[in-house]
Image: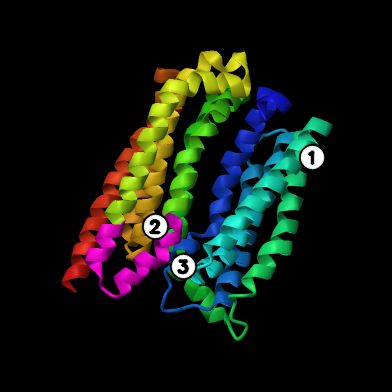
Amino acid sequence: MVILLGFKDTGIFSLAVAISSVAFTFGLYGIRGYQVSDTAKKYSDKTYIVVRIVTCLLAIGGCLIYLTFHTYSLYTTMCIVAYLIFKLSEAYVDVYHGIIQKGLRMDFIGKSFILRGVISNLLFIGCAILTRNLLLSIIVLAISSFILIFLYDHNKVKLFYEKSNITSTNEIRNLLVECFPLAVYTFLSILVMSIPRVSLENIRGTEILGIYASIAIPAVIIQVVSGYIFAPMLTVFADHVTKKNFNLFHGLLFKTLAYILILSVVVIIGGAILGNFGLVLLFGEKISKYTYLFLPILFISSLTALSWFIGLMLTVIREFRGLIISSTIASAICFFGSRYFIDHFGINGASFILITALVLQIGIMSAFMAMKLARLRRA
């Protein structure tokens, strides 16, 4: 991105990612964890799909309302809307993946990610090389993603989708109401990640945000790999809770936490040793004076993966209060503290405020998880 379009367009792209990610949460509505842990089949596959369409429409409406009250340039606004449409393709396919995951065919989901990740990103890069236009490149990314979902995922989900499934207005409403706390949690969790970046852009400008976001890209590896470790096991966790196999639940819980911790330590040590060399190799010599930002960002990635996992565990055991309380406090910390931290610690202030918020959020969620599991054992 930086090499092809420069730091300014990278900053616009990062802003589009930050804003679209918040709207994207309306599309997801926090349902995936609930869906794959719905082992009793309380709601039909059709209900989950219809609700996802409704929430995606809410996401578009929410984003358009937000943009009418902000004075971004027309070009920046169009980039944000185009990127949101791309993100909604991911929101829509997510409900398909929930159905496939319950059918225990995670290999289909993995192939879907690879297919879209390779082809859509190659088309995005190719368009950027040919046109040097960020907006056109994002449009190509969005269109190609929807086409690939139709060609691959739409056909694969038919193998698991129960054609006799029915739904009703009451079922749709009930699912929306029941998952509302999860939607609030997901929204607030993304807001926690987005507030420091938006504040950084407001205080230091689009180019600085582009530099910060570029350095953050390699750090995402902890979150991505950790997600592949624990996402396939959500149905197993839910099955242990349903059958009251709490010894098995705790064993799998601590094993997964150990994997996330080991991965984090390995990546952070690797980043400390090779970070400067790797970033300069990726983004050029201009980035060298900003490589000090890398290690705090790696800590953020590690804490984010841990936060996601504990949040999913709270979803499995249906402890929604811990999700809402922890994410509300973390959001408040970022909202009221971002400007102070950035003013006093410079660019790294965006990382330091986020680390503070995530540590507190993880601590609160862990306390709620421990209390709920203790109650379930006694029940």
81 in magenta = no
The answer to whether any part of residue 359 appears in the image is yes
Residue 365 drawn at (x, y percent): 30, 51
Quadrant in which residue 370 is drawn:
bottom left
| Residue to which mark 3 is pinned | 36
In the rendered image, the vertical position of residue 243 relative to residue 351, given as above or below: below
What predominant SS class does the magenta segment belong to? helix
Q: In the drawing, does residue 351 fall left or right of residue 73?
A: left
Disc 3 on helix, strand or loop? helix
Color theme of the render: rainbow
For the residues marked 3 and 2, what is the alpha-carbon distance in whole angstroms? 11 Å
For the residues marked 1 and 3, what is the alpha-carbon distance in whole angstroms? 36 Å
Check disc 1 and give the amino acid type.
Answer: Leu
In the rendered image, the vertical position of residue 116 relative to residue 53, given as above or below: above
**Depth check: 237 or 12 in front?**
237
| Residue to which mark 1 is pinned | 136
Q: Earlier in the sequence, mark 1 or mark 3?
A: 3
Residue 48 drawn at (x, y percent): 55, 71
Check disc 3 and give the amino acid type.
Answer: Val
Q: Earlier in the sequence, mark 2 or mark 1?
A: 1
Looking at the rendered image, the disc whose residue lies closer to the viewer, 1 or 3, is: 3
- Tell me the tag on residue 312: 2
The answer to whether any part of residue 342 appears in the image is no
* Furthest residue toward left: 378
Disc 1 on helix, strand or loop? helix
For the residues marked 2 and 1, what is the alpha-carbon distance in whole angstroms? 36 Å
Residue 284 drawn at (x, y percent): 63, 18
Looking at the rendered image, the quarter that the N terminus falls into is top right
Residue for point 32% across, 65% down: 317
Q: Which residues are magenta?
A: 230-252
234 in magenta = yes
Say if mark 2 contacts mark 1, CB within 8 Å: no
